[in-house]
Amino acid sequence: MFKKTLISLSIALPLLFLGCSSNSDEEESMVASSTFHLVDTNGVDYNVTKEGLNFYVKGHDGKVVMFDIFATWCPPCRAEAPNLSHLQKKYNEEFLILGVTIEDGIANADLDAFKEKYGAEYAIVNSKDNEKLYRAIASATKAGQRFPIPFMVMYKDGQYITHYVGQTPEEMIESDIKKALGK
């Protein structure tokens, strides 16, 4: 009797947990391809499409695109802003930085104040899709959902190049930009 109960439990328990899994086929197919509508603080639209592990920014084919996932209260994020601005200016036609804030409900005026104070002269998006995008990027890079910031991820033509966690030397980022551009 005890053996039958033990065998029954050893079969039933794994099935119970499999039945409670949140990863249905439908959810996985939704994750495989998604579109994110982003708007920067100047009102410029950016449409990002995720296909598998790739992220494409419509209208920016051929460019190196960096998603800078940050917060205005984060000291390393503040320190990175002038370096990223310098790279944005230097590689203007070949490089796009999209600052993606993790702060829910932050006003564009607060983001503009951050840009002014810390010299962030690149696009900072503030949209309802921000969280969905940065979570999708974190998942695609296997960074987990509790990643440190700044978290910067670089793509070219939608293909992953590299990512950085924490404050990163400008020279290191520039080296990877040059490699991606074939320079």
Image (tube, rainbow, N blue to C red):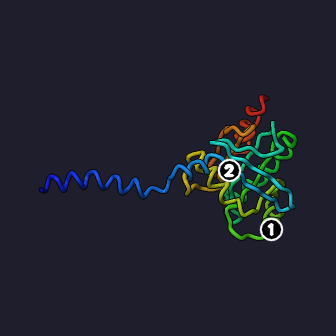
Residue 81, percent from left and from top: 76, 55
Label 2 environment density (alpha carbons within 10 Å; few <14, some 14–19, many ≥20): some
Instruction: Measure how far apart labels 2 and 1 are at the Cα level.
Output: 25 Å
Please name the residue that numbered disc 2 is placed on: 34
Residue 137 pos. (x, y %): 64, 49
The C terminus, quarter of image: top right
State which quarter of the image contains the N terminus.
bottom left
Q: Nearer the viewer, residue 62 or 80?
A: 62
Foreground of the two, 158 or 8: 8
Secondary structure beneath label 2:
strand
Q: Which residue is mark 1?
A: 108
Name the quadrant containing residue 129.
bottom right
Instruction: Identify the image quadrant of residue 155.
Output: top right
* Residue 55, horizontal then vertical, whole percent: 70, 44
Residue at 56 percent of width and 51 percent of height? 26
Q: Measuring 19% from the left and 54% from the top, which residue is drawn there? A: 6
**Residue at coordinates 59% horizontally, 48% vertically from top-left?**
29
Amino acid marked by disc 2: Ser
- Left of 141 or right of it: where is 114? right
Res 7 label: none
Name the residue rendered at 79%, 53% in the picture.
Answer: 82
Q: Please tell me whether mark 1 sits on a helix, a strand or a loop.
A: helix
